[in-house]
């Protein structure tokens, strides 16, 4: 009965939450309140995912040289900020502004800006991309196309989920989670639903509608979901996978997606929360195109009785952004594991 009430209500209203603070947890190992300036020579430029790294040799006042590891965004975000795989070369003299590692003994920092003799670059933030993507430039006639979440709703969604009541098992799992060692992204495991919906704040998504199925693709780790709309049900004793098994139906132009059979995932709802997917996890999403075709309202109903004390309801706005291209964000396991540097 609770699910039925949600399905009816979601056709006529939008669920709103008031965030108590920023829902996006910045990398925990960096002191984002501090800024350091470095000047030195590039000794290595790793154009890889999930993060690009620049290694810079600097000279201290005593004449001794030390190497700094400068971490920045993933390649797709940097490309949209004007970067290329050839922006820097070994031997380039650079000046850097960065947020240092909280461990003062580590020569590790998160890039804010970098200048050389030929370029001056700043990594575009997810906020600036979302703000840019929020400007309607065209109208879609269907769900097919390129989409990117607007700025505010993903944060409201994440904050509400972070504050959602947990079962005792959920609270224990969250308390025992270590972002630097347990994060599934360290093993190149992509986001799963419903965090997938919120992750469109950072990564461009593409929807392709076919006669008997719908594909939703995210540039993050090149992940893809297949939603079968040919009338089939969920398989009995089907294989559990990271994205689960999705079936869909159309209701007056609205795509209703029902997903079960999720595989275990150590941090399924937000990489910072450490809340797993349970074997009974069940997600229903509704993708509704706005009247003017400029955005989608994605309503989410989530139940996971093993870890959530009650079902969660939220929504995210996706904007139509045909001027953007869905890029590949391949994951290099060695690169991903650099989060664990001691």
Image (cartoon, rainbow, N blue to C red):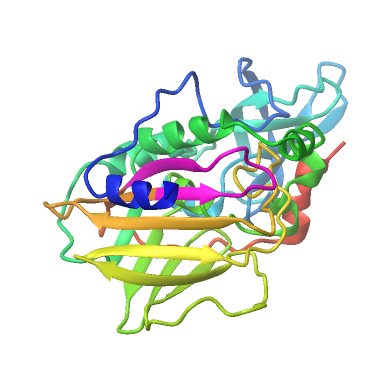
In this picture, is 94 found above or below 303? above
Residue 247 horizontal/vertical position (percent): 44, 72
Is residue 243 at least partly visible in the picture? Answer: yes
| Residue drawn at 67 percent across, 53 percent down | 277
Q: Is residue 280 toward the left or the right of residue 232 in the image?
A: right
Residue 240 horizontal/vertical position (percent): 67, 70
| Residue drawn at 64 percent across, 47 percent down | 305
In magenta stretch: residue 315 = yes
| Residue drawn at 15 percent across, 57 percent down | 139
Is residue 328 at least partly visible in the picture? Answer: no
Name the residue nearer the viewer: 214 or 284. 284
Name the residue nearer the viewer: 55 or 252. 252
Q: Which quarter of the figure is the C terminus placed in?
A: top right
In this picture, is 227 found above or below 63? below
In magenta stretch: residue 335 = no
Stretch in magenta:
300-317
In this picture, is 224 found above or below 33? below
Residue 138 horizontal/vertical position (percent): 15, 55
Q: Is residue 95 toward the left or the right of residue 127 in the image?
A: right
């Amino acid at each position: 009965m609770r699910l039925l009430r949600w399905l009816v209500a979601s056709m006529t209203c939008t669920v709103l939450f008031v965030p108590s603070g920023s829902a996006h947890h910045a990398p925990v190992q960096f002191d984002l309140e501090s800024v350091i300036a470095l000047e030195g020579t590039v000794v290595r430029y790793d154009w890889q995912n999930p993060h690009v790294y620049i290694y810079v040799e600097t000279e201290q006042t005593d004449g001794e040289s030390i190497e700094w590891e400068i971490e920045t965004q993933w390649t797709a975000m940097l490309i949209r900020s004007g970067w290329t795989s050839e922006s820097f070369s070994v031997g380039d003299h650079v000046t850097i502004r960065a947020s240092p590692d909280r461990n003062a003994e580590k020569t590790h920092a998160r890039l804010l800006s970098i200048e050389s003799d030929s370029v001056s670059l700043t990594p575009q933030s997810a906020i600036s991309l979302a703000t840019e993507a929020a400007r309607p430039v065209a109208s879609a006639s269907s769900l097919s196309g390129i989409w990117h979440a607007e700025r505010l709703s993903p944060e409201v969604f994440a904050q509400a989920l972070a504050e959602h009541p947990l079962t005792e098992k959920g609270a224990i799992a969250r308390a025992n989670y270590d972002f630097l060692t347990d994060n599934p992204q360290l093993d190149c495991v992509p986001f799963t639903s419903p965090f997938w919906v919120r992750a469109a704040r950072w990564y461009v998504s593409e929807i392709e509608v076919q006669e008997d199925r719908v594909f939703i693709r995210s540039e993050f780790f090149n992940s893809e979901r297949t939603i079968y709309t040919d009338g089939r049900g969920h398989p009995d004793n089907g294989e559990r996978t990271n994205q689960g098994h999705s079936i869909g139906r159309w209701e007056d132009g609205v795509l209703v997606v029902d997903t079960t059979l999720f595989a275990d995932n150590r941090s399924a709802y937000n990489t910072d929360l450490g809340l797993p997917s349970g074997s009974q996890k069940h997600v229903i999403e509704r993708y509704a195109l706005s009247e003017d075709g400029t955005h989608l309202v994605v309503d989410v109903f989530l139940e996971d009785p093993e870890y959530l004390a009650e079902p969660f309801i939220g929504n995210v706005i996706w904007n139509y952004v045909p001027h953007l291209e869905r890029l590949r964000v391949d994951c290099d396991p060695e690169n991903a594991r650099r989060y664990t540097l001691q």
